[in-house]
Every structure is written in structure tokens, then in C-alpha cells.
Image (spheres, rainbow, N blue to C red):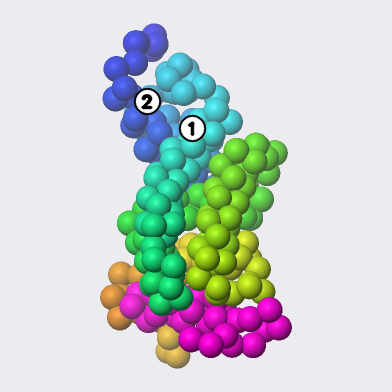
């Protein structure tokens, strides 16, 4: 089959299939051949449109990051614009958490891709963390620290670890849900469980940001 000029359709189908397979199987267990077969194209045609496996993976992770970043930056804008009082700041922080959790529920492939990387999938492609994850986490942590300081909240809080905690738990809940006493797995499609998880994240953020430098509760 000869390569044809790309009108965008083939590339989009390849990226969509690659996103699904990388999320389901991970980088190491997904071949370019499998991606091509998923969209009815041979390896040469896949390579023509997106390059080799590493280039395709970078393109998938870049798209996932940009979708994630769009939501996070919009939520940060709302957070930075909140009033200076403790109550307004806490409400804005919870709004930020809700925005990120909603993104994870609406785009489960993005948390799945990152969780695969947490298991050292594609470990040799370290530039993905350096280019995408690291700067975004830093931007969020700096912004949260600024609004907490402005409101006089959480002077002793390790904000970076708090951000990581929200990311870890939101991603894990979206993929695995929780196990009830009978052993049933209840996921985010169960609205009661989702509401319970959301309340837990709210309680976590409210509790942690209410701590003073010595770990005690600040006045409210």
C-alpha cells in the first residue's frame, strides 16, 4: 500500500486507537502493528502519518497532557481570582478539586495513560515527565501556595504533596473505584460512590489546609 497525503482523518484514527491501546495495555505491550490493525492500516502507513512507536506515544501523551492542562489552567484561573478570605479560598480550592475530578471521570484514558507510566511503562522516555507532568504540577503547587498564603491558611502544608495526593487518588478511583464488604467493585458510574469520594476529597483538602505550622488546627 503506498502512502497517501494525510487529510487528518488517518492520523486522528491512529492517535485514537493508540490512545486506547496504550491506556489498556501500556506502552511496552502495544506494538505499532496492533495499532495499525485496529484502524485497518499497515505499519508503513502508520509510520508515514505519525512516525515510529516512540513518536506515536509522545503524540498520544502530548494530546492527553494538553487536554489535562486546558482544564487545570482554567481551574487555576478561577482559583487565583477568588476572594482573600479563608472561606472563599477553601471554596475555590474545592472547586479546583471538583474540576479535576470531573475531567478524570470524563476522560478516563488520561489517568490510565499516566498510571501506566507510574508502573514504569515506557520508562526510557523520561522527557514526558520533564516536559509535561513536572511543570504542570509545579504550576499548580505554586498557585495553591499563593492563595493559601493570601488567606492565611495552611502555612505548614506541603502543597506539592497535597497536589500529588489529589492526582493519585482521583486517577486511582477513576480506574479502580472501591470494593464494598461483599467484594463488589463500585466505580465512578455509581453516583452515590462518586459523591462519597468527592466528599472525602473535600474533607481531605479542608482538613489539611486548616493546619497551622505545628500541625494543629487553625482558627476558622
| Rendered image: mark on residue 181 | none
Q: CA distance from mark 2 to mark 1?
A: 11 Å
Residue at 29 percent across and 25 percent down: it is: 9
Q: Position of residue 193 (x, y in %)?
A: 35, 79
Q: Which residues are magenta?
A: 194-220
Q: Is residue 184 magenta?
A: no
Nearest the camera: 138 or 17?
138
Residue carrying label 2 = 11
Residue 71 in view of the camera: no
Nearest the camera: 69 or 27?
69
Please give left or right for residue 56 compared with residue 217 in the image. Answer: left
Query: Image quarter for residue 188?
Result: bottom left
SS at badge 2: helix
Q: Position of residue 79 (x, y in %)?
A: 42, 60
Query: Image quarter for residue 181?
Result: bottom left
Residue 6 in view of the camera: yes
Nearest the camera: 75 or 172?
75
Residue carrying label 1 = 59
Residue at 41 percent across and 77 percent down: it is: 87
SS at badge 1: helix
Q: Is 36 located above or below residue 193 in the figure?
A: above
Amino acid at each position: 500500500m503506498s502512502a497517501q497525503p494525510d487529510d487528518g482523518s488517518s492520523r486522528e484514527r491512529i492517535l485514537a486507537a493508540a490512545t486506547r491501546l496504550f491506556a489498556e495495555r501500556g506502552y511496552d505491550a502495544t506494538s505499532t502493528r496492533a495499532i495499525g490493525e485496529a484502524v485497518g492500516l499497515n505499519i508503513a502507513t502508520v509510520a508515514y502519518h505519525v512516525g515510529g512507536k516512540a513518536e506515536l506515544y509522545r503524540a498520544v501523551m502530548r494530546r492527553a497532557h494538553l487536554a489535562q492542562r486546558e482544564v487545570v489552567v482554567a481551574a487555576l484561573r478561577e482559583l487565583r481570582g477568588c476572594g482573600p478570605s479563608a472561606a472563599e479560598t477553601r471554596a475555590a480550592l474545592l472547586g479546583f478539586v471538583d474540576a479535576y475530578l470531573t475531567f478524570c471521570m470524563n476522560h478516563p484514558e488520561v489517568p490510565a495513560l499516566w498510571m501506566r507510566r507510574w508502573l514504569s511503562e515506557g520508562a526510557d522516555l523520561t522527557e514526558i515527565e520533564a516536559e509535561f507532568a513536572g511543570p504542570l504540577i509545579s504550576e499548580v503547587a505554586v498557585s495553591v501556595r499563593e492563595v493559601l498564603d493570601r488567606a492565611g491558611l495552611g502555612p505548614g502544608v506541603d502543597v506539592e504533596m497535597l497536589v500529588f495526593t489529589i492526582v493519585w487518588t482521583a486517577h486511582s478511583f477513576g480506574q479502580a473505584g472501591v470494593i464494598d464488604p461483599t467484594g463488589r467493585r463500585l466505580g465512578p458510574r455509581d453516583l452515590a460512590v462518586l459523591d462519597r469520594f468527592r466528599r472525602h476529597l473535600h474533607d481531605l483538602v479542608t482538613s489539611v489546609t486548616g493546619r497551622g505550622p505545628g500541625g494543629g488546627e487553625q482558627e476558622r
